[in-house]
């Protein structure tokens, strides 16, 4: 094999720290961006948050675009190539090139503007943004964490009721342990034996004693409110609620027919649950020994019971969706237009710390101080790039949102039935970006519209063929299916095949399987379960 030297010219993309940070910030949600900003504020002394309202003549978005030095512009051009990064695998394969790995020095380098000189846009970005606030309804003292903490838990509610029992220390401890072992739905998932073995290990005698105490405690737990708590499965949960209803009927004057229906419901709950789920009336009539009418009334009674007794006590995490962009209707009638604006509430107001930056500029250290001075210049440049990358993130979101609104004008006027088919490639080609960049922008970013707040991905959907040769958006087809089912007869609900035929009458070619997939995506039960008894 003959060895030799050859020269080959190829293109490659080096992932600088600036570009990596820009890509990471682009795909973050609003909450994740807020956490990233807080982390950077803690780590970088040159970065600070402006909490005071700045004069518009000196600060704000107009100053963010002020021309800077040539080195800055060169570094900015690297950030503007976010779109190409997402497709580097495809591009490098076509050009027979590879991404150049960064050296250890490159990993910490923020070259492009390493001087300590203040640029015109160092002061602040996001000047239009108002200080973030956790207040609700104008109440400055009402913090959302305090409101979330005010939710009473199932365990505390049960512990309070358990105080009325006069128990020994062992039984009281057993009851407390079972209450703490309940899941969020109020079920006791583990068996008493497994709970006892988890405490006593291989000691058989102690396990038997614990099972005895747990059995006593379980009977007390299942007598507490809400009815059905402490059950180990759905059938037992329904049975406990029916027994509580019968016990209440024995104390209060309840009509006898209701008592009879509850007894039939008890017999039904003793049967396999899949029969009840399928509403197999004939089979349930045979197994319960009741009439057809009584079984139907019993199923209706069971349908009014609570399958998850702890549901109302669950402290649901209050994640309020804050839109990144706002769509505002401007004008009236035919001249009406939709204007897209960034939500200033989610735009962080950041600036370079003037005092620290000026002090670094004036101090020119030598010898040992030179290394420290260079390191501080790195942190200063890092703060500047962080501000610029955040600005570019919001600029990209605004561009993509404008393109979406322009292509989905009918939705903002008539609603989801007027949604048109749209894929990521259309927006990417229009803006000169890569599809993966559009995917990053539209993930976990939300738009407030006249019809509600939606994720940007909501406006993208595949198309179904129509008789006219065009395409209908899958989102519009889902809305049409939901409309058909909402107007159906309760006694004769529409089957998937009937819905498919109705769509064909509207000129939309949609198979039965596709209808079933869309219906399941809308969390709508099949026709057999929607039928009224």
Image (cartoon, helix red, strand yellow):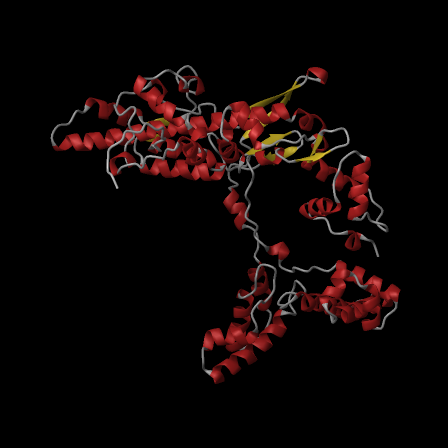
User: Is 417 left, or right, of 444 in this rendering?
Assistant: right
In front here: 263 or 119? Answer: 119
The residue sitting at 31% across, 29% down in the picture is 8
Locate residue 488, reporting x and y percent.
Answer: 83, 44
Locate residue 183, reporting x and y percent.
Answer: 57, 62
In front here: 12 or 38? Answer: 12
Q: Tell how many labels.
A: 0
The residue sitting at 61% across, 62% down in the picture is 186
The residue sitting at 48% across, 82% down in the picture is 206
Where does the C terminus fall, quadrant-wise? bottom right
Residue 502 in view: yes
The residue sitting at 66% across, 24% down in the picture is 409
Residue sitting farthest toward the front: 1
Residue 51 in view: no
User: Is 352 left, or right, of 80 in this rendering?
Assistant: left
In front here: 244 or 123? Answer: 123
């Amino acid at each position: 094999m003959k060895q030799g030297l050859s020269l080959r010219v190829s293109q490659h993309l080096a992932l600088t720290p600036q570009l990596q940070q820009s890509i990471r910030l682009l795909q973050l949600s609003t909450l994740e961006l807020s956490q990233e900003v807080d982390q950077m504020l803690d780590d970088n002394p040159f970065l600070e948050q402006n909490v005071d309202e700045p004069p518009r003549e000196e600060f704000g978005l107009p100053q963010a675009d002020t021309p800077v030095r040539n080195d800055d512009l060169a570094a900015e051009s690297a950030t503007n190539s976010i779109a190409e990064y997402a497709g580097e695998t495809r591009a490098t394969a076509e050009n027979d090139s590879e991404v150049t790995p960064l050296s250890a020095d490159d990993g910490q380098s923020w070259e492009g503007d390493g001087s300590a000189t203040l640029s015109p846009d160092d002061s602040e970005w996001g000047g239009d943004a108002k200080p973030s606030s956790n207040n609700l309804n104008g109440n400055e003292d009402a913090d959302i964490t305090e409101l979330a903490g005010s939710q009473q838990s199932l365990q505390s509610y049960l512990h309070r009721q358990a105080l009325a029992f006069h128990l020994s220390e062992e039984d009281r401890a057993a009851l407390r342990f079972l209450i703490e072992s309940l899941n969020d739905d109020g079920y006791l998932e583990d068996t008493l034996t497994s709970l006892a073995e988890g405490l006593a290990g291989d000691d058989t005698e102690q396990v038997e004693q614990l099972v005895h105490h747990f059995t006593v405690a379980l009977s007390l737990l299942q007598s507490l409110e809400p009815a059905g708590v402490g059950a180990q499965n759905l059938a037992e949960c329904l049975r406990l609620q029916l027994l509580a209803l019968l016990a209440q009927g024995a104390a209060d004057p309840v009509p006898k027919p209701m008592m009879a229906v509850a007894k039939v419901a008890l017999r039904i709950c003793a049967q396999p649950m899949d029969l009840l789920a399928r509403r197999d009336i004939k089979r349930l009539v045979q197994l319960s020994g009741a009439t057809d009418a009584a079984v139907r009334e019993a199923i209706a009674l069971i349908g009014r019971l609570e399958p998850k007794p702890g549901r109302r006590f669950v402290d649901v995490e209050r994640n309020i969706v804050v839109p990144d962009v706002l769509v505002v209707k401007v004008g009236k009638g035919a001249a009406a237009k939709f204007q897209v604006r960034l939500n200033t509430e989610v735009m962080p107001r950041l600036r370079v710390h003037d005092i620290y930056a000026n002090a670094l500029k004036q101090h020119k250290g030598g010898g040992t101080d030179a290394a420290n001075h260079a390191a501080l210049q790195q942190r200063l440049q890092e703060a500047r790039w962080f501000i610029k990358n955040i600005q570019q993130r919001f600029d990209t979101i605004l561009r993509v949102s404008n393109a979406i609104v322009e292509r989905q004008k009918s939705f903002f006027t008539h609603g989801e039935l007027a949604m048109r088919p749209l894929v990521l490639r259309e927006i990417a080609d229009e803006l000169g970006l890569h599809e993966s960049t559009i995917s990053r922008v539209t993930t976990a970013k939300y738009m407030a519209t006249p019809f509600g707040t939606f994720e940007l991905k909501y406006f993208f959907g595949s198309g179904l063929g129509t008789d006219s040769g065009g395409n209908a958006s899958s989102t519009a087809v889902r809305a049409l299916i939901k409309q058909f089912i909402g107007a159906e007869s309760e006694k004769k609900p529409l089957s998937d095949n009937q819905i498919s035929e109705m769509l064909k009458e509207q000129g939309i070619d949609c198979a039965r399987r596709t209808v079933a997939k869309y219906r399941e995506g809308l969390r709508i039960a099949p026709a057999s379960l929607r039928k009224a008894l």
